[in-house]
Image (cartoon, rainbow, N blue to C red):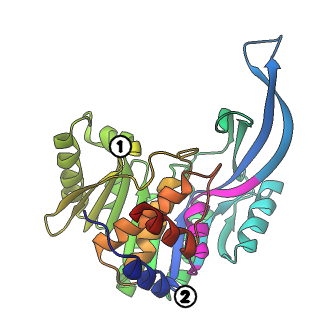
Amino acid sequence: MADFSLVAASAILDRCIGRRVVVVGDVFLDEYLVGRPERLSREGPVPVLAFERRFCVPGGAANPTRNLAALGAVALQVGVVGADDAAGELRRALGADGIDLAGLVVAPDRPTIQKTRVVAAGLSAPQQVARIDRQDRTPISGAVETAVIAALHRLAATADAVLVSHYRSGVVTPAVCDAARAAARARGVWLTVDAQGDLERFHGFDLVRVGRQDAAASLRRRLETEADFEAAARGLRAETGARVVMLGRGAEGMSVADEAGGYAVVRPANVSEIFDVSGAGDTVIAVATLALAADATVHEAVALSNYAAGFVVRKLGVASPAAADVLAEIDGRAK
Protein backbone atom coordinates (compact mmCIF):
# COMPACT_ATOMS: atom_id res chain seq x y z
CA MET A 1 0.00 0.00 0.00
CA ALA A 2 1.74 3.14 -1.20
CA ASP A 3 2.11 6.25 0.94
CA PHE A 4 0.30 9.48 0.18
CA SER A 5 1.43 13.07 0.10
CA LEU A 6 1.82 15.50 2.97
CA VAL A 7 -0.69 17.79 1.23
CA ALA A 8 -3.31 15.03 1.07
CA ALA A 9 -2.72 14.11 4.71
CA SER A 10 -3.07 17.74 5.79
CA ALA A 11 -6.35 18.09 3.88
CA ILE A 12 -7.79 15.00 5.58
CA LEU A 13 -6.71 16.17 9.03
CA ASP A 14 -8.34 19.55 8.38
CA ARG A 15 -11.61 17.77 7.55
CA CYS A 16 -11.36 15.77 10.80
CA ILE A 17 -11.85 18.88 12.92
CA GLY A 18 -15.32 18.98 14.40
CA ARG A 19 -16.33 15.46 13.34
CA ARG A 20 -18.38 13.77 16.05
CA VAL A 21 -17.32 10.26 17.05
CA VAL A 22 -18.90 8.14 19.79
CA VAL A 23 -16.56 5.66 21.49
CA VAL A 24 -18.09 2.88 23.56
CA GLY A 25 -16.13 0.31 25.53
CA ASP A 26 -14.09 -0.56 28.59
CA VAL A 27 -12.56 2.63 30.02
CA PHE A 28 -9.49 2.39 32.28
CA LEU A 29 -7.29 4.58 34.40
CA ASP A 30 -3.66 3.79 33.57
CA GLU A 31 -1.37 4.58 36.50
CA TYR A 32 2.42 4.76 36.10
CA LEU A 33 4.83 4.54 39.03
CA VAL A 34 8.29 5.49 37.79
CA GLY A 35 11.50 4.84 39.73
CA ARG A 36 15.24 4.63 39.23
CA PRO A 37 16.86 1.19 39.78
CA GLU A 38 19.18 1.18 42.81
CA ARG A 39 19.88 -2.46 43.69
CA LEU A 40 18.38 -5.91 43.94
CA SER A 41 16.11 -6.59 46.88
CA ARG A 42 17.42 -8.78 49.70
CA GLU A 43 13.92 -10.22 49.99
CA GLY A 44 13.77 -11.62 46.47
CA PRO A 45 15.29 -11.39 42.97
CA VAL A 46 13.57 -8.11 42.10
CA PRO A 47 14.94 -4.60 41.55
CA VAL A 48 14.46 -1.91 44.15
CA LEU A 49 13.39 1.37 42.53
CA ALA A 50 13.78 4.78 44.09
CA PHE A 51 10.44 6.50 43.47
CA GLU A 52 10.61 9.48 41.09
CA ARG A 53 7.10 10.26 39.93
CA ARG A 54 3.55 9.07 39.47
CA PHE A 55 1.22 9.96 36.65
CA CYS A 56 -2.11 8.71 35.35
CA VAL A 57 -3.68 8.80 31.90
CA PRO A 58 -6.99 7.50 30.55
CA GLY A 59 -6.60 4.07 29.00
CA GLY A 60 -8.59 1.26 27.40
CA ALA A 61 -11.53 2.66 25.45
CA ALA A 62 -10.71 6.12 26.80
CA ASN A 63 -7.45 6.17 24.85
CA PRO A 64 -8.96 6.20 21.34
CA THR A 65 -11.29 8.92 22.62
CA ARG A 66 -8.28 11.03 23.65
CA ASN A 67 -6.69 10.42 20.25
CA LEU A 68 -9.84 11.70 18.56
CA ALA A 69 -9.94 14.82 20.72
CA ALA A 70 -6.26 15.54 20.06
CA LEU A 71 -7.03 15.67 16.34
CA GLY A 72 -9.84 18.18 16.82
CA ALA A 73 -12.79 15.80 16.75
CA VAL A 74 -15.77 16.05 19.09
CA ALA A 75 -15.18 12.90 21.15
CA LEU A 76 -18.07 11.40 23.10
CA GLN A 77 -17.29 8.67 25.64
CA VAL A 78 -19.66 5.85 26.57
CA GLY A 79 -18.48 3.45 29.27
CA VAL A 80 -18.76 2.32 32.87
CA VAL A 81 -16.93 3.54 35.98
CA GLY A 82 -17.25 2.77 39.65
CA ALA A 83 -18.12 5.08 42.54
CA ASP A 84 -14.50 5.48 43.63
CA ASP A 85 -11.49 7.79 43.59
CA ALA A 86 -10.17 6.29 40.35
CA ALA A 87 -13.41 7.34 38.60
CA GLY A 88 -12.89 10.91 39.74
CA GLU A 89 -9.31 10.93 38.50
CA LEU A 90 -10.38 9.46 35.17
CA ARG A 91 -13.18 12.01 34.77
CA ARG A 92 -10.83 14.90 35.50
CA ALA A 93 -8.28 13.66 32.98
CA LEU A 94 -10.87 13.15 30.25
CA GLY A 95 -12.54 16.46 31.00
CA ALA A 96 -9.19 18.23 30.68
CA ASP A 97 -8.97 16.86 27.13
CA GLY A 98 -12.39 18.31 26.30
CA ILE A 99 -14.12 14.94 26.05
CA ASP A 100 -17.89 14.72 26.49
CA LEU A 101 -18.54 12.51 29.55
CA ALA A 102 -22.34 12.40 29.38
CA GLY A 103 -22.18 8.74 28.38
CA LEU A 104 -20.24 7.51 31.42
CA VAL A 105 -22.45 5.26 33.55
CA VAL A 106 -21.73 4.69 37.24
CA ALA A 107 -21.92 1.10 38.53
CA PRO A 108 -21.49 1.30 42.33
CA ASP A 109 -20.81 -2.43 42.65
CA ARG A 110 -17.90 -2.41 40.17
CA PRO A 111 -14.47 -0.81 40.56
CA THR A 112 -13.21 1.62 37.98
CA ILE A 113 -10.71 -0.43 36.00
CA GLN A 114 -7.21 0.64 37.00
CA LYS A 115 -3.94 -0.72 35.62
CA THR A 116 -0.81 0.16 37.56
CA ARG A 117 2.52 -0.16 35.77
CA VAL A 118 5.82 -0.04 37.63
CA VAL A 119 8.48 1.40 35.33
CA ALA A 120 12.26 1.47 35.75
CA ALA A 121 13.77 4.69 34.39
CA GLY A 122 17.39 5.62 33.81
CA LEU A 123 18.05 2.73 31.43
CA SER A 124 18.63 2.98 27.67
CA ALA A 125 14.83 3.10 27.48
CA PRO A 126 12.22 2.96 30.26
CA GLN A 127 11.33 -0.66 31.11
CA GLN A 128 8.09 -1.91 32.62
CA VAL A 129 8.94 -4.34 35.43
CA ALA A 130 5.48 -5.14 36.84
CA ARG A 131 1.78 -4.46 36.34
CA ILE A 132 -1.13 -4.72 38.77
CA ASP A 133 -4.72 -4.74 37.44
CA ARG A 134 -7.84 -3.87 39.41
CA GLN A 135 -10.94 -4.87 37.46
CA ASP A 136 -14.15 -6.88 37.31
CA ARG A 137 -14.63 -8.60 33.95
CA THR A 138 -18.21 -9.66 34.66
CA PRO A 139 -20.42 -8.58 31.73
CA ILE A 140 -22.65 -5.63 32.56
CA SER A 141 -26.36 -6.36 32.79
CA GLY A 142 -29.63 -4.98 34.08
CA ALA A 143 -29.89 -1.26 34.72
CA VAL A 144 -26.22 -0.60 33.92
CA GLU A 145 -26.41 -2.25 30.50
CA THR A 146 -29.69 -0.45 29.78
CA ALA A 147 -28.10 2.90 30.70
CA VAL A 148 -25.08 2.25 28.46
CA ILE A 149 -27.33 1.39 25.51
CA ALA A 150 -29.48 4.48 26.11
CA ALA A 151 -26.40 6.70 26.22
CA LEU A 152 -25.07 5.13 23.03
CA HIS A 153 -28.30 5.76 21.12
CA ARG A 154 -28.60 9.32 22.45
CA LEU A 155 -25.07 10.35 21.54
CA ALA A 156 -24.93 8.47 18.24
CA ALA A 157 -27.98 10.35 16.97
CA THR A 158 -25.68 13.18 15.87
CA ALA A 159 -22.47 11.20 15.28
CA ASP A 160 -20.29 10.93 12.19
CA ALA A 161 -18.95 7.54 13.29
CA VAL A 162 -19.30 4.97 16.08
CA LEU A 163 -16.22 3.21 17.45
CA VAL A 164 -16.36 0.17 19.73
CA SER A 165 -13.27 -0.54 21.85
CA HIS A 166 -13.45 -4.09 23.19
CA TYR A 167 -10.96 -4.90 25.95
CA ARG A 168 -13.02 -7.87 27.14
CA SER A 169 -13.74 -6.22 30.48
CA GLY A 170 -17.52 -6.50 30.52
CA VAL A 171 -18.94 -3.44 28.74
CA VAL A 172 -19.13 -4.63 25.13
CA THR A 173 -21.90 -7.19 25.52
CA PRO A 174 -23.84 -8.65 22.58
CA ALA A 175 -26.71 -6.25 23.37
CA VAL A 176 -24.34 -3.26 23.32
CA CYS A 177 -22.98 -4.45 19.96
CA ASP A 178 -26.53 -4.71 18.61
CA ALA A 179 -27.22 -1.16 19.79
CA ALA A 180 -24.06 0.15 18.13
CA ARG A 181 -25.01 -1.58 14.88
CA ALA A 182 -28.53 -0.14 14.96
CA ALA A 183 -27.36 3.37 15.84
CA ALA A 184 -24.71 3.47 13.09
CA ARG A 185 -27.11 2.12 10.47
CA ALA A 186 -29.75 4.66 11.44
CA ARG A 187 -27.20 7.44 10.83
CA GLY A 188 -25.55 5.81 7.81
CA VAL A 189 -22.09 6.27 9.34
CA TRP A 190 -18.96 4.16 9.75
CA LEU A 191 -19.09 1.55 12.52
CA THR A 192 -15.66 0.34 13.61
CA VAL A 193 -14.25 -1.93 16.30
CA ASP A 194 -10.93 -2.69 17.91
CA ALA A 195 -11.54 -6.25 19.10
CA GLN A 196 -9.61 -8.46 21.47
CA GLY A 197 -11.57 -11.54 20.50
CA ASP A 198 -15.30 -12.36 20.44
CA LEU A 199 -15.30 -11.54 16.74
CA GLU A 200 -18.68 -13.15 16.20
CA ARG A 201 -20.24 -10.18 18.03
CA PHE A 202 -19.06 -7.75 15.37
CA HIS A 203 -20.68 -9.22 12.27
CA GLY A 204 -21.80 -6.41 10.00
CA PHE A 205 -19.37 -3.82 11.39
CA ASP A 206 -17.72 -1.76 8.67
CA LEU A 207 -14.14 -1.94 9.91
CA VAL A 208 -12.71 -4.60 12.22
CA ARG A 209 -9.24 -4.25 13.73
CA VAL A 210 -7.79 -7.25 15.54
CA GLY A 211 -4.32 -8.16 16.74
CA ARG A 212 -2.27 -11.16 15.66
CA GLN A 213 -2.79 -13.27 18.80
CA ASP A 214 -6.53 -12.66 18.96
CA ALA A 215 -6.92 -13.40 15.24
CA ALA A 216 -4.96 -16.62 15.60
CA ALA A 217 -7.09 -17.67 18.57
CA SER A 218 -10.29 -16.90 16.68
CA LEU A 219 -9.17 -18.82 13.61
CA ARG A 220 -7.61 -21.60 15.70
CA ARG A 221 -4.39 -21.62 13.73
CA ARG A 222 -0.93 -20.09 13.88
CA LEU A 223 -0.10 -17.02 11.83
CA GLU A 224 3.53 -17.11 10.73
CA THR A 225 3.99 -16.76 6.98
CA GLU A 226 2.80 -14.03 4.62
CA ALA A 227 0.36 -16.54 3.18
CA ASP A 228 -1.01 -17.16 6.69
CA PHE A 229 -1.65 -13.48 7.26
CA GLU A 230 -3.27 -12.89 3.90
CA ALA A 231 -5.56 -15.90 4.33
CA ALA A 232 -6.42 -14.72 7.86
CA ALA A 233 -7.23 -11.13 6.85
CA ARG A 234 -9.35 -12.22 3.90
CA GLY A 235 -11.02 -14.95 5.93
CA LEU A 236 -11.89 -12.66 8.82
CA ARG A 237 -13.35 -10.11 6.42
CA ALA A 238 -15.56 -12.77 4.88
CA GLU A 239 -16.64 -14.14 8.28
CA THR A 240 -17.48 -10.78 9.80
CA GLY A 241 -18.93 -9.23 6.65
CA ALA A 242 -16.72 -6.20 7.25
CA ARG A 243 -15.82 -3.75 4.52
CA VAL A 244 -12.27 -3.62 5.89
CA VAL A 245 -10.19 -5.80 8.20
CA MET A 246 -6.99 -4.46 9.75
CA LEU A 247 -4.92 -7.31 11.19
CA GLY A 248 -2.22 -5.99 13.52
CA ARG A 249 1.17 -7.70 13.28
CA GLY A 250 3.15 -5.81 15.92
CA ALA A 251 6.64 -4.91 14.72
CA GLU A 252 5.72 -6.24 11.26
CA GLY A 253 2.97 -3.68 10.72
CA MET A 254 -0.49 -4.79 9.62
CA SER A 255 -2.33 -6.72 6.94
CA VAL A 256 -5.35 -5.02 5.38
CA ALA A 257 -8.13 -6.71 3.40
CA ASP A 258 -10.96 -4.68 1.85
CA GLU A 259 -14.32 -5.29 0.22
CA ALA A 260 -12.93 -4.68 -3.27
CA GLY A 261 -10.84 -7.83 -2.91
CA GLY A 262 -7.69 -5.89 -2.23
CA TYR A 263 -4.99 -6.98 0.18
CA ALA A 264 -1.92 -5.07 1.37
CA VAL A 265 0.82 -5.31 3.95
CA VAL A 266 1.50 -1.98 5.64
CA ARG A 267 4.92 -1.85 7.26
CA PRO A 268 5.44 0.22 10.44
CA ALA A 269 6.24 3.87 9.94
CA ASN A 270 8.74 3.68 12.83
CA VAL A 271 10.83 0.58 13.63
CA SER A 272 13.99 2.16 15.05
CA GLU A 273 12.78 4.18 18.06
CA ILE A 274 10.19 2.00 19.78
CA PHE A 275 10.06 2.74 23.52
CA ASP A 276 6.54 1.60 24.41
CA VAL A 277 3.86 0.06 22.18
CA SER A 278 1.09 0.72 24.75
CA GLY A 279 -1.89 2.29 23.04
CA ALA A 280 -0.58 2.03 19.48
CA GLY A 281 -3.57 -0.08 18.46
CA ASP A 282 -5.92 2.46 20.04
CA THR A 283 -4.30 5.17 17.94
CA VAL A 284 -4.65 3.10 14.77
CA ILE A 285 -8.39 2.49 15.23
CA ALA A 286 -9.08 6.08 16.32
CA VAL A 287 -7.23 7.74 13.45
CA ALA A 288 -8.58 5.31 10.84
CA THR A 289 -12.15 5.81 12.09
CA LEU A 290 -11.85 9.58 12.14
CA ALA A 291 -10.26 9.73 8.70
CA LEU A 292 -13.03 7.57 7.23
CA ALA A 293 -15.62 9.82 8.90
CA ALA A 294 -13.86 12.72 7.17
CA ASP A 295 -14.33 11.05 3.77
CA ALA A 296 -10.81 9.66 3.37
CA THR A 297 -10.36 6.54 1.28
CA VAL A 298 -9.51 3.28 3.04
CA HIS A 299 -5.96 3.55 1.70
CA GLU A 300 -5.58 7.07 3.12
CA ALA A 301 -7.13 6.16 6.47
CA VAL A 302 -4.83 3.16 6.92
CA ALA A 303 -1.71 5.11 5.94
CA LEU A 304 -2.58 8.02 8.23
CA SER A 305 -3.22 5.70 11.18
CA ASN A 306 0.10 3.96 10.57
CA TYR A 307 2.03 7.23 10.74
CA ALA A 308 0.16 8.26 13.90
CA ALA A 309 1.12 4.97 15.55
CA GLY A 310 4.74 5.63 14.57
CA PHE A 311 4.64 8.74 16.74
CA VAL A 312 3.00 6.97 19.69
CA VAL A 313 5.51 4.13 20.08
CA ARG A 314 8.28 6.63 20.89
CA LYS A 315 6.45 7.78 24.03
CA LEU A 316 6.29 6.26 27.52
CA GLY A 317 2.70 5.26 28.16
CA VAL A 318 -0.22 5.98 25.89
CA ALA A 319 0.02 9.13 23.79
CA SER A 320 -2.33 11.19 21.65
CA PRO A 321 -0.73 12.79 18.59
CA ALA A 322 -2.01 16.12 17.33
CA ALA A 323 -2.27 16.82 13.60
CA ALA A 324 1.12 18.54 13.64
CA ASP A 325 2.71 15.40 15.14
CA VAL A 326 1.26 13.16 12.44
CA LEU A 327 2.35 15.52 9.67
CA ALA A 328 5.84 15.74 11.14
CA GLU A 329 5.99 11.94 11.22
CA ILE A 330 5.03 11.76 7.54
CA ASP A 331 7.48 14.49 6.62
CA GLY A 332 10.29 12.87 8.60
CA ARG A 333 9.83 9.45 7.01
CA ALA A 334 9.83 11.01 3.54
CA LYS A 335 13.33 12.45 4.04
98 to 46, vertically: above or below: below
Query: In this figure, which residue is indicated by the disc labeled 1?
Result: 212
Residue 239 quadrant: bottom left
The residue located at (34%, 61%) in the rendering is: 208
Residue 182 visible? The answer is no
Q: Nearer the viewer, residue 114 or 288?
A: 288
Structural crowding at the residue carrying mark 1, measured as other residues with C-alpha within 10 Å and reported as few (<14), some (14–19) or many (≥20): many
The residue located at (76%, 22%) in the rendering is: 47
81 to 224, vertically: above or below: below
Please state the horizontal and vertical placement of residue 186, each as a whole percent of the image. 37, 85
Residue 90 quadrant: bottom right
Residue type (three-letter) at the residue carrying disc 1 = Arg
Q: Which residues are magenta?
A: 56-74
Please state the horizontal and vertical placement of residue 222, each as a whole percent of the image. 26, 33
Residue 190 visible? The answer is yes
- C-alpha distance separating marks 1 and 2: 33 Å
